[in-house]
Image (spheres, helix red, strand yellow):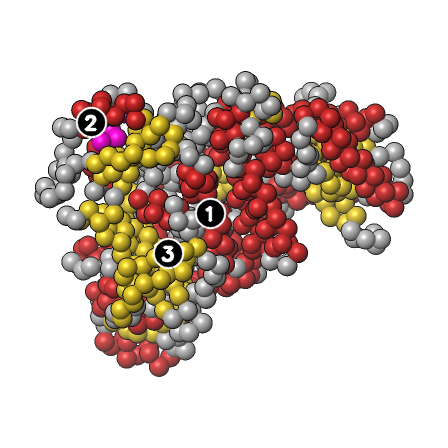
Amino acid sequence: MLTRQWLETDQGLELVFWFATDSGPVRLRVAGAEAVFFVATSQLDRVTSLLSDAPSHHPSNPPSKHAGPRFGQTQLQNFQFDKLTAVYCKSQRILLDCRQLLTEAGVPVLEGDIKPVDRYLMERFITGAASLLGKFEARQGFEDVFSCRLKPVEYRPDLRSVSVDIETSYSGTELYSIAAYSDRDSRVYMIADDATAKGRAVQSKTAIKYVKNEREAILGFLDWVKEDDPDVIIGWNVINFDLRFLEQCCERLGLKFRLGRDDQTIRWRQARTSANRYYATVPGRLVLDGIEVMRNATYQFENFSLEHVARQLLQRGKLIDDIDERGAEISRLFREDKAKLAAYNLEDCKLVWDIFQGEKLIEFAVERSLLTGLEPDRSGGSVAAFDFLYLPRLHRRGFAAPSVGDSVDAGLSPGGYVMDSVPGIYRHVIVLDFKSLYPSIIRTFYVDPLALARGLHEEDAVPGFDGGQFSRHHFLLPELIENLWAARDRAKANGDKVLSQAIKIIMNSFYGVLGTPGCRFFDKRLVSSITRRGHEIIQKTRDVIEDQGYQVIYGDTDSVFVLIDSTGEMEVKAIGDNLASSLNRFWTRYLGEKYDIASCLEIQFETHFDKFLMPRIRNAETGSKKRYAGLVRNGRGPEDFTLVFKGLESVRSDWSPLAREFQQTLYRLLFLEEPYEEFIKTTAVELLNGAHDDKLVIRKRLRRNLGEYVKNVPPHVQAARKAESTRASRGLPTLFTHGGWIEYVMTVNGPEPKQYLESRVDYDFYLERQLYPVADAILVFKSTSMKQLLDRQINLF
């Protein structure tokens, strides 16, 4: 399934689904559909009275021949075991009006927030793929299917994709070119006068189509898309920049931006949280933004610019890195060398294409959709995915769910357990890790919304926390996780990393979903019965390990760090394996005896740190949390090792590259017991002499609009404001008004933006506020410090 949407018509709702098939695109339209929610049957008389005055049509639509909401008896009940009546509406807008009337009158509405297209699919257990049984009629470029029956099916399509990118003036007011790239074809629609076109066409190897103006460029591009007929359009910030810009051009030119199949226009929806963020539905075509897909797949980069990601993954990037230089250069090429600009435009498309191909991002989006029922192009959506999987199964058990926001439980539950650490530098520390601890707790202790509702009335229920108890006989989530777990094991056995990663993300999201007020099942008893059980498990695991004579120096959520008093690699491995096996046996026996339940907990010997640092909190004797470093041996050679940093400066973009490189080198020397004093002194002298000026840029994100920083104005905000002032004086567009990432350098006159640096660097800041903290975190365990090691004469440099 590529896209789904619903339309309001005089005959009721029309649901529209586009599918990719082996024989081409297919459109399914379901006419006369109804939106539905549920109310307690005991309140039906009151509901009927309240809704008798509700409009049978929305004010923006003419009256329909259909009456207002109709009612139907069901076999469903709520979690209080009240019987439910269904309320059917011919319009989603009417449903919203009815829901508002009832909510304001204090009448609980169940499942009043489910989209009609999603309900249609979930009740048929259809996630991303279906078999279509019906009558097919050929149209221009696709088929319509009528009287269709849908059934879930295992199917993974071979989708046709195209990478799209545009170039514009730096002011964002003028379109220069539109490029499209695929393994089938590539071309650039370049705006030029006839003389330019004749002079440049023969000099370029790029497939350039010179056009006279923006209108011809857009119409030519739309004709090409219609002819090539891709299933997927990919790009980088493609919705909120490229497609949004082209939409605005079309509005200005009086054109319809018919990018969808069957010449359908894009349907836009503005984000609630930002006036500058939009979501787009292109009927019949997926639009996948590389940034959003990679975030969904849990990729982490210092920044998600195409330049940075491409250099990390492809070892190549854009021709020009600086944003101001790039804008000026693009405009110069548009004036003087359109063929070179076309090649530049197309190369951006190819960078995106190669990232998608190399990282299998389309395959990931498809697998995620097949697992969850979400649209492949949807970002986030963990709560919606949970609903899609859980609600139809809940209905089959005879229950309906509350609407989002109806929970009265505002209580907070604790997060993951973080043990007090024992600071120091250690030899031979192993990490024992519970495999998917929270999903394992859900499976083992039956933590589940349905099990909670039923378990509160059962004598043999499994006890939870905060008054929760869970049915051993009526549950859904443990079964869902068990099925996903088995599917992931199969995927890993088959070497399918894409599917394995997609399953892992979905499975691990279930705890977070239950713990957010945005979930319709939000209940402190559910969340606490996961997190507080996790606390209990980690603490008990520590006790069992220490009873065997080993010291646990740290623990975090699902892991314990154990100090092994041994010098042999094979001996450490044997101890780690034995500890993991004995712990698994312990939990099987303990849970069976105490709760009469089977343990799904599985602890693994995950990592052996040959050297390990647990630092102190700065200016304190207490050990830090969620911050450590270690050296892992990969082989027998002296250079066969990996340095691991967690929460420290070398993995944080808001520390300068100099500080991060300094930390990595210094810790390597100390872990390998090599001389380090001369390295420290040399680095400090080079810093003060200006030899590392290219490594002093600090990068930090503005998480709010620039004008919202009032009381507290941190350095990166000061730098951003200076940048905006400079840009305004030069007639350049704003960059940071609505947030974003700022790169700046600390100078003797305070923080200044990297691209508009005017003052001398404040070298003392970088020495005392960047290098000192990094070094002292580990030097304290060598009974020394940066200040002691550096000669006082260093200030002369």
Which image quarter holds the C terminus?
Answer: top right
Q: Is residue 503 above or below residue 105?
A: below
User: Could you tell me if residue 483 is visible in this image?
Assistant: yes
Position of 747 with respect to 166 (left or right) is right
In depth, the one of 630 and 234 nearer the eye is 234
Return the residue at label 2: 48
Please state, as top left, top right, bottom left or bottom right, where the N terminus lies in the image. Answer: bottom left
Residue 150: assigned label: 3
Disc on the earlier residue, 3 or 2: 2
Q: Residues within 10 Å of mark 1 (few under 14, many from 20)?
A: many
Q: Which circle's residue, 3 or 1, is located before the other in the chain?
A: 3
- Disc 1 secondary structure class: helix
Amino acid type, mark 1: Thr
Q: Which residue is mark 1?
A: 372
Query: Where residue 339 sits: x, y (%)?
Result: 36, 72
Query: Does residue 237 lie above or below 646 as drawn?
Result: below
* Mark 2 closeness class: few <14, some 14–19, many ≥20 residues within 10 Å: some
The amino acid type found where label 2 is placed reads: Thr
Task: Name which residue type carries label 3.
Answer: Leu
Residue at disc 3, secondary structure: strand
Magenta residues (range): 98-103
Residue positioned 67% across, 37% down in the render: 600
First of labels 2, 1 by sequence position: 2
Q: Work out how far the residue at label 3 is from the one at label 2, CA to CA, in angstroms.
A: 34 Å
Q: Determine if residue 413 is in view.
A: no
Is the magenta region chiefly helix, strand or loop? Answer: helix
Is residue 99 magenta-colored? yes
Query: In the image, is residue 248 above or below residue 532?
Result: below
Q: Secondary structure at mark 2?
A: helix
